[in-house]
Amino acid sequence: MVTRGFTGRRPPQPEAERLPPGQYLTEDFPVLQLGPTPKIDLARWRFTLREGSKPLKSWTWAEFEALPRTRWKGDIHCVTKWSKFDTAWEGVTIDDLMTAAGIAAPTPYLLAEGYDDYTTNVPVADLTGAKAMVATRYAGEPIPPDHGGPARLLVPHLYFWKSAKWVKGLRFTQKDEAGFWELRGYHMYGDPWREQRFTGD
Amino acid sequence: MPTWQDATITAVAPETKRVRRLTLAVGWSRPFRAGQHVDVRLTAPDGYQAQRSYSIASSPTTLGTIDLLIERLDDGEVSGFFSDVAEPGDTIELRGPIGGAFVWDPAMGGPLLLVGGGSGVVPLLSMLRHRAEAAPGVPALLLSSAGTFEDVIARDELIRRDAEEPGFRLMLNLTRAPGGRRIDAGRIGEALAGLGVPAHTFVCGGNPFVSAVSDLLVEAGIPPRTIRTERFGG
């Protein structure tokens, strides 16, 4: 349905090709979160892999910083419709985390858990194969608290609500369990290129 | 989950110099929740589309229509359309209501602390309007920050509510008026002294506003898990 009098402002072609449907480009780095930015003390910070409630492996900040590091640069897409190009992150890939823990994924699904009690579900297959990391640096600097520092999940091929801020661990689950937003009508998978914003999209 | 539907604009009116009120007819089968938003989609003749999200300003008790208060942004692709082009009788696409975290229902009770920066007051207006109709006994305080007195969204209504509704207090914070300042610990302290410890706090505005205010609220001792934030910008 054509909207009377709407002409729109089309992005230039190279930009348009990099924008998933319904997205627009921003030069800012908007902040989206449920509540206040939590205060996290690095001396007490832990990152823990769990299977259900059972801890499999836990790292302190110093231990985590000593893990092999990977850099990734590319585009991120928020379900609130902004996309940001060429963002530069550094952190530990999920593959390297699993290797360091000496485990294989015990189940095909997990929930990422944040220090703010936020959760979001991601299939393990979408985290392995260098597709995701626990990032601790953005644009060469420690990630600012408003952007999820000291550590956040980075799953750039899915809408950015899957990239949990202030991440404190990954909890493997037997089935694909809905996280915070997924319980509130957002899509279980969240592929921006298929515009999977909400349940049923 | 909501699918795209046609929604006809039934009324438009200026709210402030930069903000326009649009009333849209919606055929929703059940009421939305105060604080929720809608996605709108505009389509150009060649098929190009643009989408944006806007909070609902009206009360959920108003059935059949919703009000959006849309601020004109410089070079705003979509806000420009709503500010300059849209007229009653026009039809756009819309889906909603959306959002399940930044919401207040009368059953949640209070005290209720609402802090809005600029057009961030819009979802808070929906909560206040709902409260007045459905739960007038719930104590509520709105701290609304704007540039000048003329920029305050729903100003006359809020001043009237402050005068008429025993449980509601309005605090205006003007940043560009003479002697104006940003919201600081003093303002937050004043709000809390008037309200008591809020059971629920909602903060909405631009990124820097929400970051600064939510830090101040936590420093003032409000439990972080009782604070919900919503930000725009970008």
Image: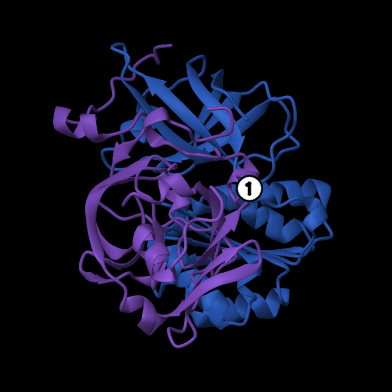
Q: Please tell me whether residue A95 is drawn above or below residue B21 in the rendered image.
A: below
Tell me if B221 is positioned left or right of B130 in this view. left
Q: Residue at x 63, y 47 (%)?
A: A177
Q: Which residue is mark 1?
A: A177
Relative depth, front residue between B181 and B73: B73
Q: Position of residue A141 (x, y in %)?
A: 24, 72
Q: Amino acid at mark 1?
A: Glu
Q: Position of residue A201 (x, y in %)?
A: 52, 27
Q: Position of residue B205 (x, y in %)?
A: 47, 56
Which chain gets the purple colouring? A
- Position of the N terminus of chain A, as image quadrant, is top left
Q: Residue at x 42, y 43 (%)?
A: A159
Relative depth, front residue between B103 and B135: B103
Q: Residue at x 56, y 20 (%)?
A: B7
Residue B103 in sight from this viewpoint = yes
Tell me if B118 is positioned left or right of A92 in this view. right
Which class describes the residues within 10 Å of circle 1: few (<14), some (14-19), or many (20+)? some
User: Of helix, strand and loop, which one carries label 1?
Assistant: loop
Q: Residue at x 22, y 64 (%)?
A: A139
- Which chain is indicated by disc 1? A
Q: Please tell me whether residue B146 is drawn above or below residue B23 in the rendered image.
A: below
The residue positioned farthest toward the bottom in the image shown: A43
Q: Position of residue B142 (x, y in %)?
A: 62, 62
Q: Please tell me whether residue A176 is drawn above or below residue B121 in the rendered image.
A: above
Q: Name the quadrant containing residue A186.
A: top right
The colour assigned to chain B within the rendered structure = blue
Residue B176 in sight from this viewpoint = no
Q: Please tell me whether residue A7 is drawn above or below residue A136 in the rendered image.
A: above
